[in-house]
Image (tube, rainbow, N blue to C red):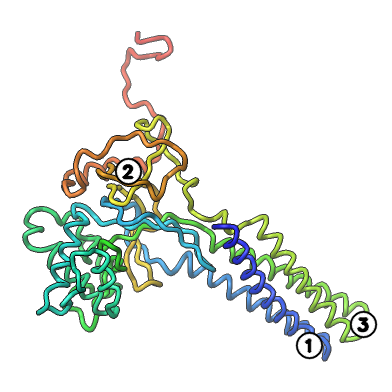
Amino acid sequence: MTTTENIAWLLIQSALGGTLAGFLGAVVSQALTESIMWGCAAGVAVYVWFLIAISELKGWYYNRRLMCIQEDQCAIGALVDAPLLSLGAFGDGDMKFDLLVAPFGQDEVRDYFRERITDSSGPFGPGPPDPSDDENLANYVAGFPEDKKNRLYVTVVHEDMLSAANRAGGRDFQDHYLARDPAVMGQEAYDHSDGDTPADFPSPNPMFRADPHETLAPYLHCELEGDRFARIMDNIMVALWTGLIALIAICVLCAAVPLPPLLCGLLSGLGAQILAFLAWLISQLVNDPDDGVAGQEDAGIVDPAYDGDSATIYPGDSLAIHGDWIMDEEHGKYFELHPVKAIYLVCRRRGGVDPPWEVIQDLTDRRADCPYPVTAVTARDAATICGQINPAETDVVQRTIERTHSQALSVAGGLR
């Protein structure tokens, strides 16, 4: 974030925190001017309600909104756009990677869309004035209502990308990321997800993301986990706990030392409010939410081909992404890999431009261009690559003796 954005975000957080603290303080102060016992009970109830609500929100967001389909899955494809960070007012800090699964190339899929959009007799025509321009195509689709856009995407997937000819040619080895398959995802997950075929009425619900990129690619969404939102919630809870403890302490003091109700109201309301706000400010410094962003510096690189350095990732590069396959209940019940546990650069696309994103900044890319396009990846290639990745990312390395011999008594002393 820029300095201006940081200042703006701090002002927004301060306004929200001040509004909440002011509301709590007003409730407590008003109540205590009438009756100490009634005011203490009302203030504690308000604080406890907010604590429970925020705890429930955090628990739902991180533990209940994502339905696990299968753990430790592997997807291979081309990066559609430069990775994006989820920021905003309450962004969770995840780094998002959008993958067009192999063996489909972006040019090929874009042409599928172009044919559907420019068919004047079809339901998606007649297309933009200049259909040869990719941006015009994307803008044209972006103007569709949600149900029409979804129908276009699932039509391209089911009738073009997964056509009988492509299936016969063995190009459907990652079709479970494009179309629901109970044999792969399990019957229970299948039954608890929405229909995703052109025949589903009134509107199909794609299992992939269908936001119009310039390439109009139906993409598998992958997210490298950040905990920015969790830090924001934790800091608010620290403030609320501080305010609650301060309120109870002042109420006990007022009960032990007879004071006028108005004075108790001011002490408890303002005291709890000020201490809560100070606790929140300290939490923001100690537990900075921006430290929970899944940025470039969080990605470790272990690759002998780079002599310890890293690679620059371009849109169009071939990646293998390893992570848990889930369904997001919040955003239209689409499927994604989340959290991403490992990202492998399979090969560089040819003709790359200046990198929009780097795994680690300011390091030189030494690897040559990819010797074959992503469209050349076969089912056997994918099985080989994922077959190497999954054990490397999931198996526990144990130091064991794999081979013994009656005469091999001592390695240090040599074979005897």
* Res 345 label: 2
Q: Nearer the viewer, mark 1 or mark 2?
A: 2
Label 2 neighbourhood size at 10 Å, few (<14), some (14-19), many (20+)?
some
The vertical placement of 110 against 386, above or below, is below
**Viewer-closest of 77 and 149:** 149
Q: Secondary structure at mark 3?
A: loop
Q: Which residue is mark 3?
A: 259
Amino acid type at mark 1: Gln
Q: Which residue is mark 1?
A: 30
Q: Amino acid at mark 3?
A: Leu
Query: Quadrant of the image for the C terminus?
Result: top left
Left or right: residue 105 versus residue 290 is left
Sequence-earlier tag: 3 or 2: 3
Give left or right: position of 343 versus 290. left
* Vertical relation: 371 (above or below) 236: above
Q: Position of residue 387 (x, y in %)?
A: 26, 43
Q: State which quarter of the image contains the N terminus.
A: bottom right
State the mark number for residue 45. none
